[in-house]
Image: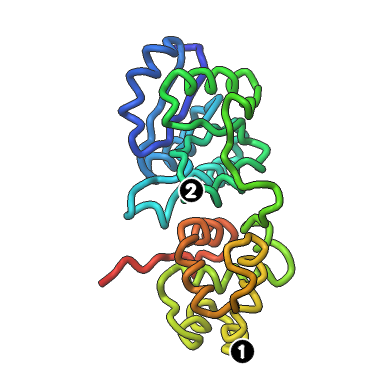
Amino acid sequence: MQDGPRILIAAALGKIIEPILRQSLTDATIRIAEDKAAVQRAISDRLRFDVVVTDLTWMDYAVEYSFDGLDVLNALRQAGRQTPVIFAAQGHGRERDHLDEAVEQPEVAGIYRKATGPAPLIEAIDIAVSGGRLDASRFPPGNSPPDIMRIHAYFKKGRGTTAARLAGAIASGRAVNHDTLASTAHVGYDTAAKMVDYLGPLIKARREHNHELKMTPEVVYRWCGEHASYILSWCRRNGYSDVATRVTGP
């Protein structure tokens, strides 16, 4: 049996990178998990990993609203597997919300940019296996500037918990007016009617709406749609799974 590092690659296209990893990490035990079920099997098996490399987001419409790298981290925690995690990012703006939460987690060794090729990934794995963290100068995380309100931080304080339910209901595609919002979010009609009061401050704090223009329900609905992938991710990982299922069409 190989006595090198034990590595889990949780990635939609993991088998593409597998030959390069095996060639470069000859003494490593490498397991590839390309979907949610495979990831759950790998984590629940007896083998404990020294490092987990996971896609930050699965760029597949059928998956992006129901599973991501933060779910992988959550599964590791629930299984009691304290393992260094490297998030593999595409490097586009749609991942920014995920990155904002990811970089704050103690298990996360750093962010690897897929566009940089396999050599930095091998380096990142070696660093994480030895207990180190990826230097931001070599592995820039790409998260939001520090003065931008983090969605996950807002959702966890005060009225943010209700804001999260409202945002999740809208992001699911099941809320189109105050009535359906109240029903989907499991809140009172009066609460649904005050959606601007709950989510407007977050949108403004993130500088995603012109302060000279009125904040309206239409703005809130559009914003929730633009951030739907992360909003649903946060909801399903924080006890709001009842609102976190995306409507995919007829």
Horizontal arrangement in the rendering, residue 81 relative to residue 89 (left or right)? right
Q: Spatial distance from mark 1 to mark 2, Cα to Cα?
A: 34 Å
Q: Residue at x 56, y 74 (%)?
A: 166
| Quarter of the image where one finds residue 131 | top right
Assess disc 2: are there few (<14), some (14-19) or many (≥20) residues with their C-alpha within 10 Å of its C-alpha.
few
Q: Which mark is residue 190?
A: 1
Which element carries disc 2, helix, strand or loop? helix
Instruction: Identify the mark nearer the N-term, 1 or 2.
Output: 2
On the image, the x and y values in percent for residue 28 come to 46, 15
Q: Is residue 155 above or below residue 177?
A: above
Q: Residue at x 49, y 83 (%)?
A: 183
Q: Which mark is residue 113?
A: none
On the image, the x and y values in percent for residue 133 come to 64, 26
Q: Is residue 27 above or below residue 202?
A: above
Q: Which mark is residue 93?
A: 2
Foreground residue among 21 and 145: 145
